[in-house]
Amino acid sequence: RWTIDPNTRNWMASPELTAAVRDLSDGHLVAVPTETVYGLAADATSNEACAAIFTAKGRPRFNPLISHVESLAAAEKHGRFDERARALAEAFWPGALTLVVPKREDSPVCDLATAGLDTIALRVPSAAIMRDLAAASGRPLAAPSANRSGRISATTAEAAAEDLGASLALVIDGGATPVGVESTIIALVDDKARLLRPGGIARDKIEAVLGTPLFAPEGNATAAPQAPGMLTSHYAPNAPLRLNAADVRPGEALLAFGAPLPEGAEQAVAIENLSPRGDMVEAATRLFSALRRLDGAGASGIAAMPIPEAGLGEAINDRLRRAAAPRD
Ligand code: TXA
Ligand code: MG
């Protein structure tokens, strides 16, 4: 475990950075904090390293990974950016936006990272540690969220270590992630800009830059998922989750939002209020850690209050719907 202060970059000349870069270059897995969630990072140019990601997460191999790079210039070595893609990158990078664009034939990113697709998902995170690791290792870093596939995403180093500890060469602890939900994924591969996954940057901000509405993902979702949006059960706690709850039933824990609390709240096994004042940004930050805590409270189920669809509410509701979806 290596603890950093994400608000400084005083790791630049440290032996720990050198060790982390060596781990990544050797094909090992490193848990890295980003502004959205913790990433399970590996060399995106190595099939062996990416295979280790899929094994550690128990993730289906048809589900491609995001490649993290230090700059738009670095991203353009791997993907073809049209005017729309460049406008979004310039507006939101570094930040919680992933762009899916046509993959360049000469990109060294391995087939396992892109699941053999002719497109690639690229992100320049605002978390400097991930950018610095990519720059220092001289390669893009593939990084899905640092949790077992289908489970609640990790927003703390403890959560990442708890889920994946045995597979990790190193855990970099930068404290709780500030955004709290994964990046927004936009595909720019045909004439329509498509929202593949709502996330840390709200739809209306992206539409304002594009000057056009975002479209839904193309085609049959279940055959070849374009984003985890298409894998119906995801982000799931062990306890069943009940959405839009107007009451709390005996034995249930409560995932609250705003006020007043629903009927029966006083007998809830545990309560987490995502934002007592109804603030969406705060609610997103707390979502996954609140779910993890409620899941650990020994309740027979989790009742979730309704959350408005506005702003980051779209991403929060997306995660909650998947967390509540039937499991296989
Ligand atoms: O905030 C985030 O995006 C975090 C942090 C660590 O950066 N990462 C993350 O990765 O959420 P992950 O693997 O949990 O979700 C990325 C999703 C994949 O599930 C995949 O469906 C989609 O991005 N994706 C990747 N490459 C794609 C491609 N070429 N076309 C369509 N979707 C793609
Ligand atoms: Mg994930």
Image (cartoon, rainbow, N blue to C red):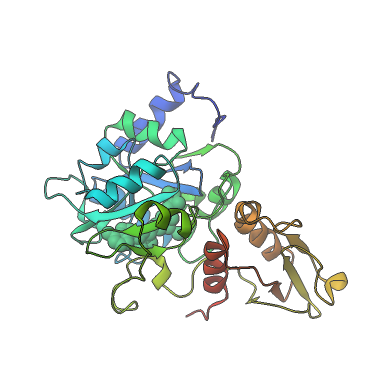
Is 66 on the left-hand or right-hand side of 285? left
Asked where in the image residue 245 lies, by quadrant, the reply is bottom right
Residue drawn at x 65%, y 51% as measured from the top left = 282
Residue drawn at x 45%, y 20% as measured from the top left = 14
x, y percent for residue 243: 64, 77
Above or below for 312 versus 40:
below
Question: Can you name the residue that lies furthest to the top here?
Answer: 13
Above or below for 226 versus 82:
below
Total marks shown come to 0
Question: Can you name the residue that lies furthest to the front here?
Answer: 211
x, y percent for residue 106: 12, 45
Question: Can you name the residue that lies furthest to the left here?
Answer: 105
Above or below for 306 versus 315:
below
Residue drawn at x 24%, y 51% as measured from the top left = 47
Question: Who is closer to the viewer here, 260 or 248?
Answer: 260
Question: Who is closer to the viewer here, 59 or 283?
Answer: 283
Asked where in the image residue 288 lies, by quadrant, the reply is bottom right
Residue drawn at x 30%, y 79% as measured from the top left = 220
Quadrant location of the N terminus in the rendered image: top right
* Residue 64 visible here: no
Ligand 2, by image quadrant, is bottom left
Is 176 on the left-hand or right-hand side of 208? right
x, y percent for residue 129: 45, 33
* Residue 250 visible here: yes
Question: Who is closer to the viewer here, 238 or 107?
Answer: 107
Question: Who is closer to the viewer here, 126 or 52?
Answer: 126
Is 15 on the left-hand or right-hand side of 301? left
Asked where in the image residue 276 lies, by quadrant, the reply is bottom right
x, y percent for residue 15: 44, 21
Is 282 on the left-hand or right-hand side of 132? right
